[in-house]
Structure formats: C-alpha cells, structure tokens
Amino acid sequence: MSKILIFSWCYFMSLSLFAQEIKVVDLTCGYRKNPIGIDLTSPNLSWKLQSARHNVMQTAYQILVSSSLGQLNKNVGDVWDSKKVNANQSIQLQYKGTELLPTKTYYWKVRVWDNFGRQSAWSDSNFWQMGLLSTEDWKGAKWIAYEKLADSNVNVLPVDGKKDQYQGSNILPMFRKKFGVAKTVKKATAFISGLGHFEMSLNGEKVGDDFLAPGWTKYDKEALYVTYDVTKQLKKGENAIGVMLGNGFYYIPPVKARYRKLKIANGYPKMICRVLVEYSDGTSTNIISDQTWKTAPSPVTFSSIYGGEDYNANLEQKGWNSAGFNDSKWKSALLVEGPKLNAQKEEPIKTFETFSAQNISVTSNGEWVYDMGQNSSAIIELTVRGKKGDTVRITPAELLKTDGSVTQKNIGGPSYFTYILKGDGLEIWRPKFFYTGFRYLQVRGAVPSGRENTSSTTKIDDLKALHIRNAAEQVGQFASSSELFNKTFNLIDWSIKSNMVSVFTDCPHREKLGWLEQLHLMGNSVVYNYNAAPLFKKALADMKNSQLPNGLIPEIAPEYVKFEWGGDMFRDSPEWGSSGILLPWYLYQWYGDKQAMVDYYPMMQRYLNYLATKADNYVLSQGLGDWYDLGPKPPGVSQLTPMGVTGTAIYYYDLEIITKIAALLGKKADALAYSKLAIEVKKSFNNKFFDLKTKQYATGSQAANAMAVYMNLVEEKDRSAVIDNLVQDIRNRKNSLTAGDIGYRYVLRVLEDAGKSDVIFDMNSRSDVPGYGMQLAKGATALTESWAALPTVSNNHFMLGHLMEWLYSGVGGIRQAENGIAFNQIEIEPEVLGDLTSADVRYNAPYGQISTKWKKTGTNFTLEVNIPANTKAVVYFPALPNGIISEENNVAFANSGIENGKAKVSIGSGHYKFNLKYQ
C-alpha cells in the first residue's frame, strides 16, 4: 500500500478571516427568482449563503414577508414573521404566514445566524406575485374562439394507423380588445392562456420574450396560463390588446400534404384572458375576454406542430393590435368551453443561440442549402426582398443526401416553412407557432444575397437559425484536457437543450413526445447542467393526468396518442412508467423537495398495484426492454437482454424506493408491505435469471449484470463476481458497449461505484466502435438516437446521454454522499485516468456552487475545491507513492485516513487549494 502523509491544520484560521461576513443571496420562491403568477397557497422558499470564511454552517434564520415594500423596509413582517428559528434549513422552507390572496404581490427577505455567532445583514428584498387560485378569480373571463370544432370531430387520444375522422384545416385567428385608461397606473398584470399557443401584444408591442406559450399539457385534464407584468406597456388613454393563436398539440390539422405524427383534436384554438389594472388611487379594473372581443383570420395560413408553418404577409392588417385600428369588419368572438386552468410553473421557452450559415451550396435543381453548423431545436429568421406574392419555401433537415440536397426521411416529412412576400422592401419573418430540429435549410423560390440572380428572383439578405429551449438556468460547466470528452459533453448538452421544452421530448422533430424513461435515466445528467426542477415537477403532473383508470402510467406523458403497433409494447413498459415512482424520490435527493413525494404518492401506489396485476410469479416481461441496445439486428426492442430482466429489476427498484418514501412520510404499514413484496420479487428474479455457476444474469449482457448489481438484486457474496463478469464482457469486446437506452446508465453507475472508472474511460475514449466518439467522427453535432449515428433515425435524441453524469461525478469528482440531500453532504473524488491531465468542473447546487479544478503534472497533483456554505465535504485524493498533501493557504482540514487506497480528508465550506506531491 502506498504511504500517504497528510499535514492538517485543524481549526487554524488567519485572523483576517474573523471579520468576514456571511451574506444571504439568491432567494427563490417555488424555484424561481421574483416569480409572478404563483398559484401555490404555501410556496417553498430557499436561499443560499456566501462567506469567505471556512466551515460556515447556518444555525438559525428569520424570514419576513410583508404586504408592501415599505413595510418590509421597516423590517415589519405583517404577513409572516417567522421570528428567529434555530435550524440549519435554507432550502424548501414552506411558507407559514397568513392566507395568501390572489393577484397580490408579497415582499420578503431573510437573515441568518451561523456557527461562529455571526448575524448576517438582511438579504436584498425579493417578491412574488400570486396568480389566480380559483375559477372565481378570473372575474368572469370566458374562453373565446373564432370557430368551434364539432364535438363529433374531437379526438383526444387518437390511435395510430386509423383513418381520420375528419378532413380539413382551420383558421388561425387574431383577437383584439380596445380599452381606456384614465388614471395613473400603479401596476398592470395579464393572466392569459391560449390553446394550443398564443402570442400576446399590447399597443402593438409583443408582451414578454417567451415562445410557444403556454406549455403543453394533457388538455382534457388541464391547461396552463401565463402571467405577465404589463405595467410599462400601458398608456393613458386608449389601449388595445392583441392575441394571435396557433394550434400546437391542442389541434393537429389533418392535411395530407404535411407531415404529422399524431391526429389529436381537442378543439380549435381558443383563449381566455384577464388583465388587472391597479391604479395609484387604490382602485382597479379588469379587462376580461368575452364576446365583446373582435376576431379575424391571421396571416398565419397554416400551422402544425409537426408539419410546419405558412405565413402570407399580404394578409397582414396594419395596426390590428393598436388602439386606433378600425375593426368594424371583424366578427365578435365566439364563447366556447375550455379546460381547467393552472398556473405555468416551469420556465418559459425562449430563444437562445443564433446560428448563421457556415456554408451555402446550390443543388442541381437550383435550390439553395444553408448549413447552420449545429443541429438544434430551432426556428428560422428570414430576411428577404422581393415582389408582392413571391413565395419562399424553406425545408429543414438534419442530414443531406449524397447530391447535397436535404432529406427528411429520418425526421418525418413533408415539413416546411412558407413565406409569401408583400413586396414593400425589406421583410423579416419568424414563425410563431412551430419549431423543429435541423442543421440544414433548403430554400426554394429565392437566391442568397451576393449569388448570381439573373431572373430577378426574390433575394435572401439573411437566413438564421434561432435555438429555442426551456429557459431553465444553466448551473453546470465542464472542461477537461480531453478534447474528445469536451466534444462529447457538447454533443450530449445539445441533445438536452434541444429536447428541454415544455416537456422533455425524445427528439425535436419526428415525435416531440415525452417518453418517460428519459426522466429517471437522464435526470442526473440534466440536473448537473440545468436547474430544471420545475420542469421535472411538471412532468409528474403530466404523468398523473395521463395515468389510466387501471393505474398504468403510459410510456408517454402527456399521452397524445396510443401506439398500437406491436400490441401494448409502446404503452406499457415498466422501465418507462417507473418515472412515476422514481422521479419524486430523485427530486427529493436532488433538491430536497419533499412535497413531490406527498403530492404523487397516490399515483405511485396505483401504478405499483397495476404492476402487481401484470407480474407472473413477480416477474414483469412486458414492454420494450433495453431499447436500442447493440445487437446483430437494426436497433429497436431489446436484443441482448431477455424480456423480463430490465422490467423486473426496475420493479424491484421501485419497491425499494417507495419503501423509503413511505417511511419518510410516516406510512409505516405501507413501508412494511412494500418491503415484503420486494423480498419476493428479488427471490423470484434470482431464481429465474441468475446462474450460480457462471455468476451471470440471463444472457450475461452488460445491461442484465449491471442492473442486477445497481438495484441490489445480487447477493453480497456474488457481487464482486458479477461486476467482474461485466468488466470482462466489456474488455472482451475491446472496450466497447452493448447496453442500450435502459441499461447503459447502470453500466456506468456500477463501474464508477466499484472504482472502475478506468473501464468507463477506455469505453468512451475511442471512435472506431459505436458510441459517442463514432457519432462525432460521423459529423454529429448533437447526440443521436442510435449508438452508431445511423442516418435512418433521429440525429438529435435525448436518451443515450448518460455519460454526462460521469463527466461531472467521475472526471470532475463532484458527487453527493449517500446520506446527502440536495448536495448538503458532498464527496469530491476526481478520477485521474488515462491521458487526462486536467479538468475544471462546476455545479451550482441548491446550496451554492461546488467546483473542482485539478491538474496533474509530473510528480504534482493540485486540486482546487469550492464547497458552499451550510454544507460539508469529504475529499478523496489519488493514491500516489509517498504522497504528501498540503493546503496552499494553510486552511483547516481533518485527516480521515485511507479508504480504498485513496487519501481521505474532511472539510467544511470554503475555497481550498490542495497540493499532492510524491517522489
């Protein structure tokens, strides 16, 4: 064993640090900073602590919530004064003040005390504004529409393969309402929903900077509304509201000439709106949607979430959303029924990166192909000049044919954008209700500026791709000395960003559906990168709304279609539906959110009751298994792992997790019953699938052995042998993977937990076998659906990005301790492997930023670590002969000895720079 010497200066601190203050920052309500439209009656409040001093822990806090900023500035909590509470909790504190009133704005701040006896200053003032808590709070606002879909044509859950009940498109309407403002406005708030999507304007200017609002849901159960502060857009005198509507997933027009994956028809577009105007004199007024609103067709002549969008600029009505417009030729709005409304709690969709063409080429038929250089979820922005009536068609695609033209075979087509010019100079257009995934754009009917244009064809001044995604805050960063790992990180990140919208979709083009296995398998990878808790919680609501009466949680949520090809295999897979069990538990682990377990416990119970009815001697064999594993046939249903292995393993894991949840929620009888059932499942699983002689599960596939180990189905005496078999299979295949969508995450988890990250490194440091390296070598710029980046399937897919988790936890070494919640107990254990010489990794966790920066040179290893206040950490160092560990600034750390051949030290919060020297 290597000899490790550790120098520690426990409790030593330079005198200059004693004067350093503790500061309260980053206050959030319901995960968001200064949110508006909150419909939670007891929202959760959180904050972070900052201090340059080491080993800082909060010992007490005080929260003030006030009805006005003036009261708060006087330190008067007239709504809630928690008083001084002796506790270290700084996340997920439930509001416990007086009853919160709809539309009311509340102001709050926090101060804390720490373990050094210091009292912080009050935090900066923050606020939240309540939304509408009941139907009555809409003040009589009605759902309004341009036209109504006949009840006989409503098709809430279509079945694939069946003929349409109805043929025809629909009008994409505009609505307007004029109103006066005679007094000084103190505050104005709009509460609005438009289905499938809306774009609101006030006095001719767009309200908000979001896109595809509101988020999409299971519309027969709920719709979402969005809240905007429109104070600055109001003016004294005449004002006008304008609203445009698109179809989204609410209605997919059955037009044969355009691609559509689904045939859903909840109804034609509709909207509901309440604008609350509060005046400085204490009075208020409401502008509500009703039959006095006027409506007309918009210039959007076709809109489908799958088939594209068409816009005829000649149909524009100048000033339609301004006060002076003459709407006498518009018709009165039609009153219709609409779904139950809840506030949108997840971040909106917004535009982010902008891509210009890296190359423009011409096809044999005279069309132009723009290469944007990046495959992403995006819309276009077209800048064009031409004659009135000229038509430009733009076809998006991920891939090109051999002749250089685009192909939509792998993403579904025909799908395209069409713009008809009005011919009055420079025209700029963006679609309002359609996005897709693409890298290439093929243009018909126009010529790029600067290219030969002998026939005076319409000229494109510019064509851009605007990446759109959910606006969840980015909280992670990764960089290393391995260019392949850096590119792999970006590859996976683009698939996350491209499929993180109102749901976590599988792909941004062909399906755009919320396949559920991704949530629990890719959850850790997402959380390291983005503060996506509200989006995960929204996914739970979608699951609850999609759950069948018999308890089944279908593989897709919101469930917009019932795929009947192959029986129920695309509806009933335990590996998919188990997100309903696992996601609430993971939210508790990731964010300390206990409420999700409380809210969705009945859903979990109903699903486990359903699985029990499907089990044959406690074995579940239905579904897709290890989807898209690498077998001898084209990828699809599990090939190397027999049906029953992955389904039963996840069933056992569900039971183990709900046992913990039940115990945590004080449901002792439930915990005991689930624990007993888990024992029977484990016994049956091992009897059926484990070979005592070979120490292999089922066929000995990577997925089978890894899942048995991870789910603790392996008896302890056999654990090492099964792990050895997993490693041997990988080594025998020259360090290549075979596990698919379900199994690969568990392969990585088992190897890392067993101290075998060297195997992970070897598997993912090559490009000659299917995997991330091969995808990059084939030119992929986003993670693809298949390990081999096949041109026949999606080339921007979410499901196989599990290595992202290891890049943070392994290369970066940022892990949560087994008993940690929301990273309050941290492990720092960077894996120094192969030719890796450095890494710089950061994760802004619920308590604050955790970062590691390490470098290996010759006989030196340096490790810079930042641990947030109110947390603790254990640091593991690579085992090196005769190593000496020191801290550059002589900051305190405790020698914890040697564990698994690695030096181990315990530290509190603060910044450290460790040096490990060896001879």
Image (spheres, grey):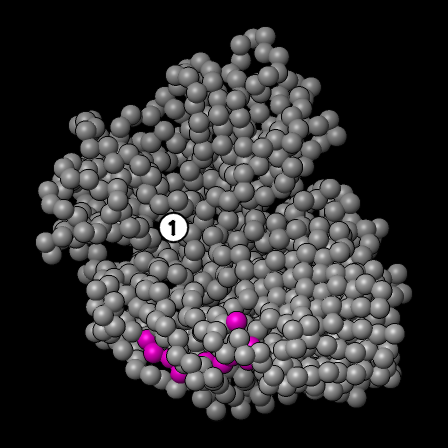
Extent of the magenta region? 52-63
| In-front residue for pair 441/296 | 441
Residue found at x 48% / y 52%: 470
**Where residue 357 appears, x then y in whole percent?**
61, 31
Which residue occupies the foreground of this view, 335 or 59?
59
The residue under the point 39% across, 44% down is 209
Q: Tell me the quarter of the image containing the N terminus.
A: bottom right
Q: Is residue 285 visible?
A: yes
> Percent x, y for residue 358?
65, 31
- Give the residue pinned by disc 1: 214
Coordinates of residue 709 in the picture (x, y in percent): 73, 78
Identify the residue at horizontal 18%, vertical 51% (top origin). Answer: 186
Is 57 contained in the magenta span?
yes
Q: Tag 1: Cα neighbours inside 10 Å, few (<14), some, or many (≥20)?
A: many
Q: Residue at x 67, y 70 (%)?
A: 913
Instruction: Give the residue at the far front of this rendering.
Output: 15
Residue 271 screen position, x and y as percent: 29, 46
Whether residue 178 sits left or right of residue 599 in the image: it is left
Q: In which quadrant of the rendered image does the C terminus lie?
A: bottom right
Q: Is residue 217 above or below residue 406?
A: below
Q: Is residue 767 above or below residue 99?
A: above
- Residue type indicated by callout 1: Pro
Q: Secondary structure at mark 1?
A: loop
Drawn side of residue 750 relative to residue 50, left or right: right
The answer to whether residue 551 is visible is no
Image quadrant where residue 252 sits = top left
